Amino acid sequence: MGKRTTARRLSMQALYEAEHGNTAILDAIEHVLEEKNISTDSREFIKYLAEGSWDNKEIADSVIKKYSKGWRVERIGGVDRNILRLAIFEINEKETPFQIVINEALELAKEFSTIEASKFINGILGAYIKDAELKK
């Protein structure tokens, strides 16, 4: 598994823990990194993704609400919601090609959620990308 793939997985886990454990995001990040042999660069990327996604979750939630058609953000499973938050943050940062971000989000959904969730996530991210590209 690649360093960035691992970083995204651990970032999503920190987001989930912060949300569902009522834990500060920095504490959640430290917890998921405990006893893991991860390079300093990867740790910085994990912190960047998790903190950025957490700090911008209202923006991500508004995107999720817009494209989830009939699903309240709170009704979406915690894992799926945090995968979406992570992906939307990364798409908005424009540092990684959106195709890679979407593929990584789908892989996270397949590993930690369901095939149906990956289809749901793909639909939301695909619609968001399509609309964002049309506005350019």
Image: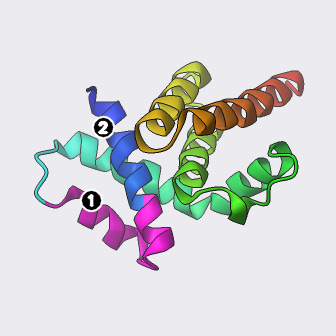
Mark 1, residue position: 32
Decide: is 35 above or below 109: below
Three-letter code for the amino acid on which mark 1 is drawn: Val
SS for callout 2: helix
- The residue located at (74%, 36%) in the rendering is 124
As for residue 30 lying within the magenta part, the answer is yes
In this picture, residue 80 sits left or right of residue 132: left
User: Which quarter of the rendering shows the C terminus?
Assistant: top right
Return the x and y of residue 62 as percentages of the image width and height: 78, 55
Q: Can residue 24 be seen in this view?
A: yes
Screen quadrant of the N terminus: top left
Dot 2, crowdedness within 10 Å: few (<14), some or many (≥20)? some
Q: What stretch is highlighted in magenta?
A: 15-34
Residue at image coords 26%, 48%: 43
Question: At numbered mark 1, what does the secondary structure look like: helix, strand or loop?
Answer: helix
Residue at the spot 65% in from the left edge and 39% down from the top edge? 92
**Mark positioned earlier in the residue sequence (2 or 1):** 2
Image location of residue 38, percent across then percent down: 16, 44
- Which residue is the site of mark 2? 6
Contact, CB < 8 Å: mark 2 with mark 1?
A: no
Category of crowding for the residue at label 1, using alpha-carbon neighbours closer than 10 angstroms: few (below 14), some (14–19), many (at least 20): some
Q: Is the magenta stretch mostly helix, strand or loop?
A: helix
